[in-house]
Image (cartoon, rainbow, N blue to C red):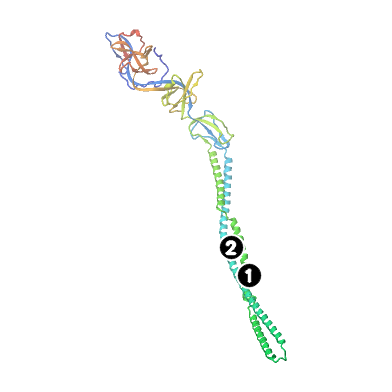
Amino acid sequence: MKFPKINKKLISGVCIVALIGAAAGTLTAFGIGGGKQHEASYVKKGSISGIVKESGDIEGEDEYTYFARVSAPIEYVDLKVGDLISKGDVLLTYDTDDFERTVSEAGISREQSEMSAKGQIDKSDEYSAKYGKAAAEDAAYATLYALEREYGDKIDEGQYTDNWNTKRASDSINASIASKNEEIAEKKADLADLDPDDEDYSDDYRSLNKEIAELNEDIAGLNKNLASLPPTELDPDEYARLNDTSNWMEDITRNWTEAKTHKNTYEAGILNSSQKEALNKQTDLLRSKEEAAAEELAKASEGVKADFDGVITECNVKSGNVVSEGTPLFKIVNCDELKVTVMISKYDIGQIKKGQRAEITIADRTYQGEVTRINHVATSDDSDKTKVAVEVHIDDPDDSLILGLEADVTIYTDEQKDVLIIPYSAFYIDDDGDYCYVIEDGIIVKKYITAGITTPDHVEVKDGLNDGDMVITDSITDSQVGEKAVGTVH
């Protein structure tokens, strides 16, 4: 059975790289005694590809959704679905008044924090220096007070010791005087007991009087010693020095108290490292807020710009809308990255592989392309036939391509080079296999072959023919086998 001819225009269906025979002439082979003329062609080597043809709509490979980068009112946007945009175009602008006000307020807060922190830290440093001076004065006055107190204590202790020693000496002398007075009294009593008529009276009397006189002399000596004891009060110089010390200690105490008060006041005003760090961190936080506000202002001032040439496929906002950060604004298809999705039947999908060459035809324009994706989930079309979606990338799209427009796609499968090929018009099939009619020595011969890739124009011959064999390309039947024939090759 012979394949019906396909009249649909092919785009680079078969590439013949090796031609054998003369061009634009007529070659005639003569059999013995001549014969009927037939259109013919030589078996020759060339390149051949299987093809799969389908139609599909032009789509964008990448559709980008633009989201609001800030929360703000939209000042201006004028986009419609289908609009062409160029890379760098400003597509949308925001009202930036609130952002400018926020940046200004953040800057003022940051400056106030910086000045406050600097003032507190400078005051702390000043207090730290004054604290050192007050602490030194505190220590100095403490030392002076201790020295003066020690001196006064020495005077008091010395006077106390002197008084103690004097008292002890006085008590001892008085005790001796008292003892001697008792002896005198005893002796006077003894003297009173003497009998004046006793002849021995005069001797005893004289002896007792002498003893009494001696005791009185001892008492006089003791009283003299008692009188010579040191006084129990300070002398004028000592009193004056002690009085000066007391006054001086009052001054020291007053100044010392003042130094302590200053020291405590300054110490309370000194910031420790954690407090200074807290002040600096507060300023850093406000600075970060100011920077964040400035970044938001920059983003709002920039608006939304196109990142590439494209087509608007969806627009969700208009001027005056207030959007939140993350709100979808519009969608854009990248015009530099287009594709055609074709639905391939279960009979042809086995031939399709990623990377295969393709041609995309729209009206009278043809574009080169490549199979980039084969969907691994089949779907049913309107006639309930199962098909597989295959995406074909368009290599160099131009402005003539319009999204949604139908395009014819030819996918080249199993491309072979330097193989034997014959015209499709010379190819036949019956129950016994593939065959063709060959003119050998001027006689028509039927030869069975092993066919490979088959296209509407050519057939690959894997076995059964040789390079240079002549095959008949016009209509012929088995009844003509064995007849004489002449082949006309164009």
Q: In terms of depth relative to the viewer, which is nearer, 284 or 278? A: 278
Q: In terms of depth relative to the viewer, which is nearer, 278 or 99? A: 278
Where is residue 103 shown, x and y percent of the image?
A: 57, 43
Q: In this view, does 187 lie to the left or right of 42?
A: right
Residue furthest toward the top? Answer: 479
Q: Name which residue type carries label 1.
A: Ser
Where is residue 48 shown, x and y percent of the image?
A: 37, 21
Is the residue marked by circle 1 packed among few (<14), some (14-19), or many (20+) residues within 10 Å? some
Q: What element carries label 2?
A: helix
Could you tell me which residue is drawn at 48 percent across and 19 percent down? Answer: 386
Quadrant, the C terminus: top left
Report, in whole angstroms, how far the alpha carbon at label 2 lies from the one at label 1: 19 Å
Q: Which numbered marker is on residue 246?
A: 1
Q: Which numbered marker is on residue 138?
A: 2
Q: In terms of depth relative to the viewer, which is nearer, 204 or 80? A: 204
Is the residue marked by circle 2 packed among few (<14), some (14-19), or many (20+) residues within 10 Å? many
Could you tell me which residue is drawn at 36 percent across and 17 percent down? Answer: 451
**Location of residue 294 by image quarter:** top right
Disc nearer the start of the sequence (2/1): 2
Q: Name which residue type carries label 2.
A: Asp
Q: Is residue 235 among what the camera can see?
A: no
Q: Is mark 1 on a helix, strand or loop?
A: helix
**Location of residue 150 by image quarter:** bottom right
Residue furthest toward the left? Answer: 32
Q: In this view, does 76 lie to the left or right of 444?
A: right
Taking 293 as reference, is 267 above or below it?
below
Where is residue 450 shown, x and y percent of the image?
A: 35, 16
Q: How many labels does the image show?
A: 2
